[in-house]
Image: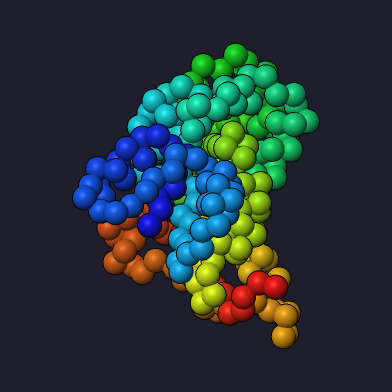
Amino acid sequence: MYLVDRDREAIDYLKQVFTGTPVATINQNFLAASQQLLDENRHFDMILADLGTSSPHLEKANRGFSFSKSGPLDMRMDSRQALSAETIVNNWGLDQLQRTIAEYGEEAQAEAVAKAIIANRPIADTAKLAEIVTIAKRSYVRASKIHPATKTFQAIRIAVNDELNQLKSSLPLWHRLLAPGGRLAVISFHSLEDRIVKQYFSQHTHRGYDADLIRLTKKPLRAKPDEIDINPRARSAKLRAVAKIKIER
């Protein structure tokens, strides 16, 4: 069994949890780890990809993921990389910033938010960024259960970690890494991720005799109410799964 995570803290935690168990850990992102395993000619009966952030990311203020805790503008899942939220927030131009917030956050007021961010530079921490976004959206936002900065923080985080491009590039590798009869399950946490997974699975399960994947979940599986009571962050989780039915030609 291989456990993969780009976050060094997560890898250290996994090593503690699986002490005495024959597992190998890879401290890389999904894409780099998948390519490494493919180069080693590995094949698997089961691949589970759990996308997005983890609770420690959101709970530790020093990681800079949360708008509810004041911390540095970081948001890097892999602290070894150069790009951080600070670079995006304080250096990107209006067009790039607005496009990122609109596309990755699906934020209807992306232009107003981007202009407010630029007008208030330099921005030092997550609390200030959340305040700026909230003020920028105040005249547009109706009563909502989600924080006004949620979509902007999501967009910046996705951009920092290149999450959607990583997912798009990793899916074909996971497909190739499956042994005949092997199963691939992906847990996504927002519509952008889920759409990519859904489209890839559909492309390879609707090819008639050429199909080499079979859908195991007609609709995505969602967390049950008792699971959400224990872990409220599971509310938005969706699991889609497929199985490999043919040997690649």
Q: Furthest-top residue in view?
A: 122
Horizontal and vertical percent position of residue 228: 34, 61
What residue sits 31% from the left and 45% below the top? 14
Q: Is residue 151 visible?
A: no
Q: Quadrant of the N terminus?
A: bottom left
Above or below 88: residue 175:
below
Q: Nearer the viewer, residue 187 or 183?
A: 183
Q: Quadrant of the C terminus?
A: bottom right
What residue sits 70% from the left and 45% below the top? 103
Q: Furthest-bottom residue in view?
A: 209
Q: Furthest-left residue in view?
A: 20
Above or below 187: residue 244:
below
Q: Is residue 50 visible?
A: yes
Horizontal and vertical percent position of residue 210: 72, 80
What residue sits 58% from the left and 24% below the top? 82
Above or below 177: residue 205:
below
Q: Nearer the viewer, residue 130 or 52?
A: 52
Image-based side of 66 in relation to 115, left or right: left
Horizontal and vertical percent position of residue 9: 36, 35
What residue sits 69% from the left and 38% below the top? 100
